[in-house]
Image: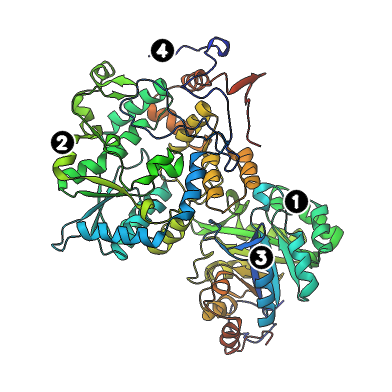
Amino acid sequence: MEAKGTGLLAGGPRRRIIAKLEVKGPNVVKGLHLEGLRTVGVPEVFSREYNLQGIDEIMFIDTVASLYGRNNSFDIVKKTAEQIFIPLGLGGGIKTLNDVELALRSGADKVAVNSQGVRNKNFLREIERNFGSQCLVAHLDVKKKNGSWIVLIDNAREVTDLDAVEWAREVEGLGAGEIFVTSVDKDGTMKGADVELIQSISSAVCIPFIYSGGIGRPSDVTDVFLKGGADAIAISAVLHFNKTTLKEIRDEVSSHAISIRL
Amino acid sequence: MTIEKISHSQKKNVLHGLPEKVIFCKRCVMSNQRPSTSPELVKKSSKIDTVHFDDDGICHACKYSDEKKKINWKQREDQLVELLDKYRRNDGYWDVVVPGSGGKDSAYVSHVLKARYGMNPLTVTWPPHRYTEIGWENFQDWLRVGGLDNISFTPNPKVHASLTRLAFLNLLNPFQPFIIGQKNIAPRIAFEKKIPLIMYGENQAEYHNKLSETQSPIMDRSHYTWDGERKLFFAGIETDKLSEFGIHKKDLSVYMPITESQALETGIDIHYFSYYHNWMPQENYYYAAEHTGFKPNPERSEGTYSRYASLDDRVDGFHYYTMFIKFGQGRAMNDAAHEIRDGHITREEAVALVQKYDGEFPAKYFQEFLKYINITVEEFWITIDNNRSPHLWDKVGSEWKLKEQVC
């Protein structure tokens, strides 16, 4: 694995830009610090639009699945997979191997697991054994506390005493193929990424690392890649609210000689 | 004060003046056992008025939310501008009092009045019993980021704790002293500073008072004034008798309402902002986060799923928990009912949330609460169990179970 986070290796491996669609029932919602359920549209429209603009992947997160103890997003993934042929991920409320199977059968290429992995580490290992690490994304919602970051579960409603960086290392060992970290402090603010967090995670793990939270301008994405060293960025609010476009982001990022899909 | 345990079988079937038959609103999950807001200082016991339901099984708060859809909000905003023009001053003095704690709702109202309508608000705070860390930060940011003047009145904490203790033991309503102070402080400051306009956030009808109360933008003066003669009660105890508990007249002045004649002299009126603008707590959250630096709780509050409401007081959980014991409806039900009416969640989701969180014990600050009101764990549980009404609660083995649950 190449060294990350120095900015000296601009160019380097191809970085990905992912659209994150937080789903509640039939709608896409966007909160602030993962709180609030403001409806911003429907998943079909967003995924079609972002696909047209050339997004690399789409990650659906069912925001209430853990909260209500159920997952209703398989149909949304299914409908999307019939029309769009880029990688799709599904997270939120994945609790059993059956859920994983349902997600994959619906057309998801991978599942993102947070709460259930924290409650039962073995679950991550079982997914890896049964389906392979390529489809297992370890999903971490993290919040800054006393100079480091703690892991939150149930859509950031419950705190744990897990240190985010240590947990990131651990899930890598448990067989995760990718790690997906959302900064709860930055989520929805559109005021810039938590670069320090990105640096800490990217220097701790070797598996591909997707960061999400706080993107407000194209240059914030450059920071995520160049200063932070993440492999991929998952974006939501700034695209949903049309504050910028994928084209603007790609133009800005590629002007720094960062390799992306153009 | 010694507390005697009352056996469940010896109680009257229905306590607290509740309706005997439990009904959950067909639309929003709210129970008909929920109290409606009424003046506190005349209450001699834990007997309360409850929310209003029509025969069709739908509560008045839902009926009001139907009415709200017909309101011409543009016209209402014009009315607001007209009102503000009447009170707006150009000599630099404050022209509106906004009571609040720096939570999302008061942050929204005060900031909008200042930024959008060019008013010069004086915010007035009756602080929490015990600030949470996030509550204190939000209070400070409200003023610092929002750029607002504030008077925060701290009542004598010894007296406040004693009154809270009595209200817990006598009425199982530990928040009564806070509510009394919170209600009366803004009119008092308005009277003393001669600022006749007070702007509240939401009308109580948003939370289940009578539909008829929504027709006026103005709060009835009986909620915050008295005639200067009528007997008043704290924790169900007549003010003269409070000296038995070491609480004297001089300790109570800040809790007292202003008199009707004082209100008339200054021309004080309390208007509801929710009359003039469509009141959506969730939108207030987004607004406050953007304009006054408001932050949600780092974790959900015990007893509910929400992270943005009622998070500034460490003993707050006991307000909702005691409600749950007395009325069989707790904090998650309050939150979920409102979110259904605002179209954020479905009834099915609300039922799941209520079943998951309603009545969760506020363990986090339990020891602190006991110490604060100076009672033992035994006294706490005896008081709790004494207040469980037999028409709501059954004891199954060693566990208390609600007889009726929303589904």
Percent x, y for residue B85?
Answer: 22, 61
Q: Chain of mark 3?
A: A
- Residue lying furthest right: A130
Residue in view at x 58 percent, y 82 percent: A249
Quick check: B398 left or right of A183? right
Relative to B7, does residue A195 appear above or below in the rendering? below
The amino acid type of the residue labelled 1 equals: Lys
Instruction: Give the SS element for disc 4.
Output: loop
> Is residue B295 visible to us here?
no
Instruction: Give the SS element for disc 1.
Output: loop
Which numbered dot is residue A180? 3
Task: State the residue position of label 2.
Answer: B261
The amino acid type of the residue labelled 3 equals: Phe
Gap in angstroms between the C-alphas marked 3 and 1: 17 Å
Task: State the residue position of label 4.
Answer: B2
Which numbered dot is residue B133? none
Instruction: Give the SS element for disc 3.
Output: strand
The numbered mark, 3 or 1, whose residue comes first in the sequence reads: 1
> Is residue A94 visible to us here?
yes
Check chain identity for marks 2 and 3: say if they share one: no
